Image (spheres, rainbow, N blue to C red):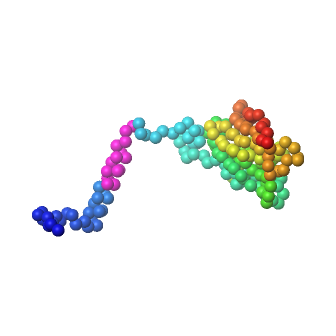
Amino acid sequence: MQTSALPDLAHTDTKPVHWLATAAAMAAVVAGAGLLQPDSATATATASEHRSTAQHGTAPVPAPDPATASFPLDCGSAGHTVAKRAPGDLDGDGRPETVAVVHCAAGSGTPPSGVYVLTQGSGAAPRVVATLVDPAQKMTVGDFAVRDGVVSATLLGYSSIDVPRCCPDQRENVTWHWKGNAFVRSTGDLARSA
């Protein structure tokens, strides 16, 4: 092995103080880079973010929690299950509503669903302000979403009482949007899946 003609350099022997100095220098560089962002990188709120904040720049209003709501379901002692939920400002008033898909708790089978719109009441518990799908219609809900003030769902149903309740043979894609003072339903064709 050939030895170096250069003397040993003292700065090649690292000590903890060297690592601390390097970390401090890197932190200063990262902080400086954050302060020197161009104006075009400034984040701006979208229209939906503006709508979900209360007046005068206060914190956003939370969407109603369906776990604390009372639904118009007669489930007896079985209780109910909130199967799906999605928040959104459906009426454009700046406060979010919550759309909840709810059915009676069942040990087996496919109980019919109700689709309800909740708003935060003046008290602590949210209240149901609209029923989009009544469980009496004997439908279940497949796909479900709330986007840009529109509720969309795939409703699954049965063509007759002879169809087993496990296996719906009808499918309908529906949407609801707020118009005037009510929800307006738009629907696709009722399709039969063989």
For image coordinates 14% across by 67% down, the residue present is 3
Residue 33 appears in the picture as rendered? yes
Residue 187, quarter of the rendered image? top right
Point out residue 96 in the picture as x, y percentages from the top left corner. 64, 43
Residue 118, quarter of the rendered image? top right
Give the main secondary structure, helix, strand or loop, of the magenta stretch.
Answer: helix
**Location of the N terminus (image quadrant):** bottom left
For image coordinates 73% across by 38% down, the residue present is 173
Point out residue 78 in the picture as x, y percentages from the top left corner. 81, 59
Where does the magenta region start and end?
26-39
* 91 in magenta: no
Residue lying at the far front of the rendered structure = 1
The reply, left or right, for residue 111 in relation to residue 83 is right
Point out residue 115 in the picture as x, y percentages from the top left corner. 75, 45
Point out residue 176 in the picture as x, y percentages from the top left corner. 71, 36
* Nearest the eye: 9 or 99: 9
* Nearest the eye: 58 or 97: 97
Residue 80, quarter of the rendered image? bottom right
* Nearest the eye: 147 or 143: 143
The reply, left or right, for residue 38 in relation to residue 1 is right
Residue 139 appears in the picture as rendered? no
Count of numbered tags: 0
Residue lying at the far right of the rendered structure = 161
For image coordinates 74% across by 34% down, the residue present is 188
Residue lying at the far top of the rendered structure = 180
For image coordinates 46% across by 40% down, the residue present is 43
**Location of the C terminus (image quadrant):** top right
* 30 in magenta: yes
